[in-house]
Image (cartoon, grey):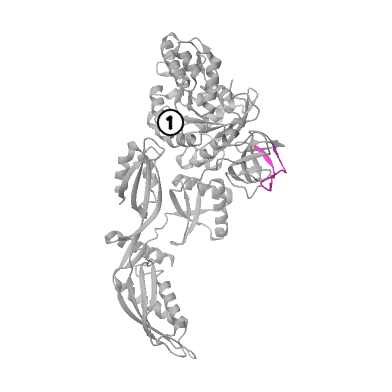
Amino acid sequence: MAGALSNGTRCAALVGPYQSGKTTLLESLLYATGAIPRKGSVKDGSSVGDSAPEARSGQRSTEISVGQTEFLGDDWVFLDCPGSVELAQEGYNAVLAADVAVIVCEPATERAVALAPLFRFLQSRNIPHMVYINKMDTATQPVQAVLDALQANSDRPLVMRQVPIAEGEQNTGYVDLVSERAYLYKPGEASDLISLPDTLADEEQLARQVMLEAIADFDDDLLEKLLEDAVPATDEVYQQMAKDLREGLIVPVFLGAAEQDHGVRRLLKALRHETPSPDDTARRMGIEPSGEAVAQVFKTLHAAQAGKLSISRVWRGEVAEGDSLNGKRVGSVLKLTGNQQKKASKAGLGDVVAFGRMDDVTTGDLLTTSGKAPDGLESWPEPLTPVYAFAVETQNRADEVKLTGALQRLYEEDPSLTYKQDTAVHQLLLMGQGEIHLKIAIEKMQNKFGVAARTETPKVPYKETIKKSVSQHARFKRQTGGHGMFADVHVDIKPLPRGEGFAFSDTVVGGNIPKQFIPAVETGAREFLEEGALGFPVVDVAVTLTDGQFHAVDSNEMSFKLAAREAMKEGLPKCAPVLLEPILKVDVDVPSDFTNKVHGLVSGRRGQILGFDAKEGWPGWDTVSVLMPQSEIHDLIIELRTATQGVATFSADFDHLQELAGREADMVVQAHRTDMAEAS
């Protein structure tokens, strides 16, 4: 059968929404193949997947878990990926390293839209994928309704491979539509082969015809046979299925209930016979079979004992401990299963291994003996754009020197996390995909790197400006014995158009102020504008030095700098200061069914809707463009996801500063003054 029984280790990534049962499926796959003697559970923390402390405490996957096994003489690696939309980067990285993605979902039509971003990603990279509809033992909706809901989110045709056998309201087995064999589920064991129920014969024939017509769209010989009412051979159908999957033409759909081991062995057999080989996958990526060793890092871990681990897939050749890749020595080669590490002498085609202590290697790097990537290789995609942020600081001041290093290691492990020092508000920001994402990062930072941190909502970089002009005189004089300090200045302070910044000029004549002191006046004015009459940096102001006096002995640059500051201190409050808030241009990507909800949501956050249009390359999705105050952005993603089954997202960029007046401005100024008083 095509695409099966080839050399090399094959790899399948288990992906899908939160609580769809991926970790339970991994346990069942490992148990069914004899890799583990008994199944663990997520609830009691005994599963192979979810082995990280943060996963155990939250009873949810937080990072890729690796499971190694063997099935009918073939080596397999399964990558169990987090389901939370906030941890989607882990799943995207895993499918880039896999031969096939198994999308695990529940039999619920209302949750199908949550799979849209995943379907789009797999299709955009042409990654073969199949669907496993899990929890069929608790299904309350017809399978066809679930399939239709899933199909609405996929450009590829979804091809049902089974129909359920029902007894009352319970699904007790299935009919395989290719072999036309019927099976009765047995919890924890392989299903029993039974005779096809007479009551199901018509439904099975209709479903099989639909399946055959779907794959016949891609094969003229098969189409001709169907038109002639000829029955294609079973092997021919399997071969066409494997070919179509490998070429990304169809998405096979299987049924089961992983907690009961239902349908798991049938899924394993389909994977074995239809999943592309590592050679096939490498070719799809642009890597030919012959040549130097090639491996790609798809996950970085910092382990307590082993140090930095670069989890990689070998696409060509062999890699052993001590080899050089990209000019870096491979410190060790480790095979992973859950949190267990086992030393290996070498890694070959298709193997998923961790290379130890390759400090300068990052996620997405392609590793070769020569350090040169093959020509024409598709680039590793950019990480997801941050949509949520915390301001972070250490709980213990002694840990401040360790904080940046810990954040850098978090970023290496998960590139959808990032951090930066926001100089405008003097805060260190940790940014990611949502509140849960960042809380996991903070927990991990303490568990793995020993840095306990506290978080708060990031401050908004408000500014202020002036609306009136004023002429101001100021004199600075100090006598302390010996040389004193003296400077006298006259300045005009005027507003500038929005976005002009700061401008300084002088019209001093007759040498009333020596030229060498004039730059000090500009410096003094600039420095004072860092905190204006309302307590915020002042923008769009022009200062003109018009006149002044100096003393031949006591005047110096510092005197004129301090005199300028005094002039600004006395003059700015007379210029009708006004608060400015940053306004962002926000593009919200949302399924069209939820577009009206988004309109109401952003309007409630003082957003100004600019319009909306179809999202390019995403049928059934819109992009809503909005102008929105930055103060309304912090938890926007939470409300968007709540309103859209968790799938809407946004990007935001600074657009302009806008006046803020009235009660809202008063509250901002008062809160700022309170913060400053507490800080002092």
User: Quarter of the image containing the C terminus?
Assistant: bottom left
Above-or-below relation of 236 to 93: above
Callout 1 secondary element: loop
Q: Residue at x 58, y 48 (%)?
A: 448
> Residue 74 in the image: x percent, y percent?
64, 25
Q: Quadrant of residue 169?
A: top left
- Taking the image as shown, residue 249 lies to the left or right of residue 6, namely left
Residue type, numbered disc 1: Asp
> Residue 409 in the image: x percent, y percent?
57, 50
> Residue 38 in the image: x percent, y percent?
59, 27
As drawn, the residue found furthest toward the left would be: 662
Q: Quadrant of residue 629?
A: bottom left
In this view, the residue in front, 73 or 506, is 506
Above-or-below relation of 637 to 19: below
Check residue 615 for magenta coloring. Answer: no
The number of numbered badges drawn on the structure is 1
Query: From where the camera sits, is residue 46 visible?
Result: no
> Residue 517 in the image: x percent, y percent?
45, 82
Above-or-below relation of 22 to 427: above
Q: Residue at x 34, y 42 (%)?
A: 613
- Taking the image as shown, residue 34 lies to the left or right of residue 187, namely right
Query: From where the camera sits, is residue 297 visible?
Result: yes
In this view, the residue in front, 631 or 280, is 280
- Taking the image as shown, residue 479 lies to the left or right of residue 402, namely left
User: Quarter of the image containing the N terminus?
Assistant: top right
- Taking the image as shown, residue 332 lies to the left or right of residue 666, namely right
Q: Quadrant of residue 243?
A: top right
How packed is label 1: few (under 14 Cα within 10 Å), some, or many (20 or more)? Answer: some
The magenta region covers 318-335
Which residue is label 1 attached to?
155
